[in-house]
Image (cartoon, rainbow, N blue to C red):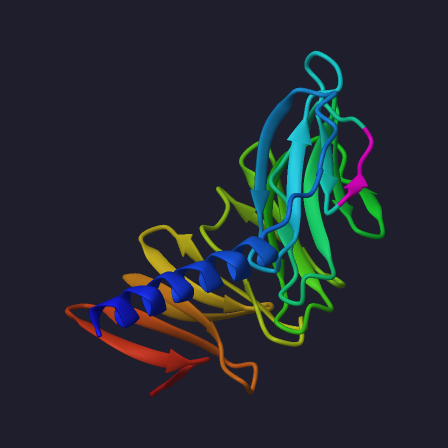
Amino acid sequence: MLKFIYLLTISLFMSNYLVAQYQCNDYLLLDGMEPLKSIGMDTTRNWWAISEPFAGMSRITISGKQSKTYNDISTPIFSPDGNKWAFFAEDNPTLYLVSNDTSISLGYGKPGKIVFSGNSEHFAYSYYQNNTEYIHLNDKKYEIIDGVKDVFIDYYGTNLAFAIRKGYNLYAVKNYTEYGIYDEIKILGFDDNSKIVYAAKSGNGWQFYKDDKVI
């Protein structure tokens, strides 16, 4: 009986080993001709690598697609379906927003945020000029002194939200509408009806809101 169990254990081990060996494969992602600065893989199974083709220059390769060279390149952001991506690239003195199908010159500035919509069709982006953050989503544009911590967009990519401070007070902003006045705010995102959902504190108590309604 012990001999049978031993043989069965060896058989199962060899079977699992052969299956694992069959499932593991090696792929050449980069040829190694350019020094590697950073590399990563997104949850969408896209991989990216930033290399240094020349001293002080950067190039990014995203799932095999290679970019031109820039002075600096940010970590790419991928859409939820994995079919689209975007990153910032600095080509002194110009900042560019580069996506899988276009490149936009942003003039002088520093990289900000990139946020894709849930349906992967749109994305919001921001960049800084001095102490002002410029936020864009489709035809909407915002200028925020000292910037914002986070930017949220709804599933369809039509509504945008963030929290701003004016003096000692905080406000939740959805598109061009302000909700407030609060002492603290934590924005959670949008519900399936494109209402902004957030927690806000006034005085000693916290409450949850959808737009301007307490829930």
Res 135 seen here: no
Q: Residue at x 55, y 49 (%)?
A: 144
Residue toward you, 65 or 130 = 65
Query: Which residues, given as a range, are shown in magenta?
Result: 64-68
Left or right: residue 96 compared with residue 193: right
Q: Quadrant of residue 78?
A: bottom right
On the question of residue 50 being in view, the answer is: yes
Magenta span main SS: loop
Which residue is painted at 69% across and 21% down in the image?
Answer: 52
Residue 206: x and y, percent?
23, 73
The residue located at (79%, 26%) in the rendering is 69
Task: Give residue 170's position: percent from left, percent from top.
Answer: 37, 60
Q: Quadrant of the N terminus?
A: bottom left
Q: Nearer the viewer, residue 124 or 116?
A: 116
Q: Quadrant of residue 200?
A: bottom left
**Front residue (pair 182, 18):** 18
User: In the rendered image, which quarter contains the C terminus?
Assistant: bottom left
Q: Percent x, y for residue 214? A: 34, 85
Q: Is residue 17 left or right of residue 110?
A: left
The tally of labels here is 0
In which quarter of the view is residue 165 placed?
bottom left
Horizontal and vertical percent position of residue 93: 74, 23
Residue 55 is inside the magenta segment? no
Q: Residue furthest left?
A: 204
Task: From this view, report whether residue 121 is shown above or below residue 101.
Answer: below
